[in-house]
Amino acid sequence: MFKKVLIANRGEIAIRVTRTLRELGITSVAVYSDADRNGLHVLLADEAYHIGPAPSAQSYLNIEKILEVAKKAGAEAIHPGYGFLSESAEFARAVKAAGLTFIGPTVENILAMGDKLASRELMKKAGVPTVPGSEGSIRDADEAAQEAEKIGYPVILKASAGGGGKGIRVVHEPKELPSAFRTCQSEGKNYFKDDRVFIERFVQNPKHIEVQVFGDTHGNVVHLYERECSMQRRHQKLIEESPSISVPLDVREKLGEVAVRAAKSIQYVGAGTIEFIFDNKTKEFFFMEMNTRLQVEHPVTELVVGYDLVKEQIMVALGEPLSFKQSDVRQKGHAIELRICAEDPVTFTPNPGKIRKYRMPAGPFVRVDNCAYPGYDVPIYYDPMIAKLIVWGPTRTECIQRLQRALAEYMLTGIKSNIVLHKNILVHPEFLEGTYTTQFIDQQIAGKKHRELFMFVDEPVFLIAAAIEAYNQSKSRDVGDYTLASQWKRYGRQKSMRN
Amino acid sequence: MYFEAESEGVHYQVSVSESKTHWKVGMRQDENDWNYFEISKEDYRYLDDTVSFIFKDSSYLIDVISKGTDYTVYTRGAYKTFNIYNEEALLHESLKAGGGLGAGNELVSGMPGKIVKVFVKPGDKLNQGDPILIMEAMKMENEMRAVSPVCIKEILVKEGENVESGATLVTFSKES
């Protein structure tokens, strides 16, 4: 067993990893930037080291500095969490070169899946279904038009290295194609230093279904069933659940088989996720990409299958075989995760700042992976996600009821959050029926007024509370010349109203 | 106590009074009728600095954060910010409103007060932003300035004089 492990990350995932390390008796080492001295991950870890200024490039992405700290602390292994350096082959290689263990896949695994275009070719060869599309990257707008005719509109253009909503364009008609191609290419070039673009069929009414896979160094690869992550805003996930209500039994088995085949074809080691685009009408699924890391939404799988995925990652990194076989893996009940973000619930603009009141839900089968606390200042430099609320129930219906209950307990003041957005989604018929697609937010929420989302509050409550507060403040300030006050009061009021 | 409130372009008039056992909050949106809410202090209580408010049998946990004249109310994941002027702030606003010289042909006092200092004499030509006089009201001194170039015609007040609201203080003609 490792004695000491460094976590090259921040926020809730650093805390999540710390928890398993402690359960295994491993000393946990946190790292932090200038902006994170008060981060909960620092407060909860056994050891903590400063690694640089607030911008990620100079701290959480600074390979040299992180390795220097790992050596100084005497850590034997590094867990990268998600994001930051988790899918950097360069980092995985550097960790190995420094004589430490990278808790994650092999450098070859990361490289094989790091390039969207190359990974799709690889998957095609392994017999994994992919969306009909161009064989390779497209040279120019003319070639794009030819390919689009072959595939059939609508089509989607993607920068090879694109992601997070950047470098992606949907084209419904031929006349939109040339400008979409140009912007896609330039975004790829500007954001990812890669101007290759490919084109494929745009699946309508699409769902995002992914399969959790796990491999070890003994050649075992298993899957832990699917997660549905169709609830997205700005191409980023908001709600994840397992199992997916839209996947029939036979398709579920097939999804698992295909995912295992995909992972085996690259001798995958550790936790990984194979993302599919799922056609809810035809129940077809197509390979999108593989994420060679632990996912944000791994807890829904943990709650449904009952394994600690971080623990498995650590054991696999130690060279142990997986603690379970495919035949041991059973889906039990239903789990849903909500991402709680410091952002405007309608515009999704991040809203970092100081949290005043903070109380998390609790009670039966409620888990909160959290990094906030009262008085915590959400930094502007990183992802606005501050917590994940994950709930389990024996059925999807009970799970949703429990989530509604848990959300009602959640109190967060001082900054805007998307808690109220979740409340609205959880009572929406499309979510309740499970027919929602990745277009849900655009179609059902975008363009709504804040007032509509705040339907859980009786309108006068706001002004009554504000007025009583204003009254109390002015009473405590008052020095008391009421006679004069009453004279000018009326005049001042009228004047002010006129302007 | 009387307030003016504004949120997202909607104006409210608000009155708040308290007795030993109750709050009485009146609100009026634009020119609509007044709505009064009689709230038992049992139903609106401070727990630490969070408020527990039982309104129409519904239990709200409320946090109000104030910053200057902004009051943001957070409850049930929803939030709303009001710009609330109490009487003191209203005075400020109306002084500013009435104190601009150059809009009409005379400077009128926005409210009762005392002239502390007069900077000009008849015939003075002023540029925009030049001070005219200082008037004190509610223990605050407010400097009134010209909002456009003017020529002072007549000064109708003396330093130390008390003036009523609406009194003409200075007359002038506009300079182009």
Image (cartoon, grey):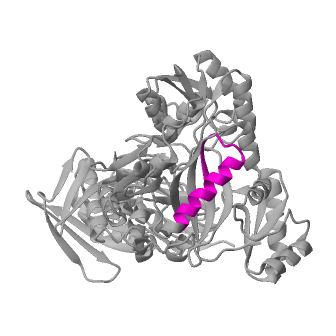
Q: Name the magenta segment's main secondary structure.
A: helix
Residue A46 position, x and y percent, is 46, 23
| Residue B120 belongs to magenta span | no
Residue B123 position, x and y percent, is 60, 65
**Image position of A311 with respect to B168: above or below:** above
Residue at the front extreme, as displayed: A327
In the displayed structure image, the side of residue A361 where residue B59 appears, left or right: left
Which residue is located at x 45 percent, y 68 percent?
A245
Residue A398 position, x and y percent, is 31, 63
In the foreground, A54 or A274: A274
Query: Can residue A348 be seen?
Result: no
In the foreground, B28 or A485: B28
In the foreground, B49 or B71: B49
**Image position of B163 with respect to A103: above or below:** below
In the foreground, A224 or A393: A224
Residue A406 position, x and y percent, is 32, 56
Counting every numbered tag in the picture gives: 0
In the displayed structure image, the side of residue A150 where residue A258 appears, left or right: left
Query: Can residue B16 be seen?
Result: yes
Q: Which residues are magenta?
A: A251-274
Residue at the left extreme, as displayed: B20
| Residue A266 belongs to magenta span | yes
**Image position of A29 with respect to B145: above or below:** above
**Image position of A416 with respect to B156: above or below:** above
In the displayed structure image, the side of residue A307 where residue B38 appears, left or right: left
In the displayed structure image, the side of residue A93 where residue A5 appears, left or right: left
Q: Quadrant of residue A146?
A: bottom right
Which residue is located at x 44 percent, y 55 percent?
A337
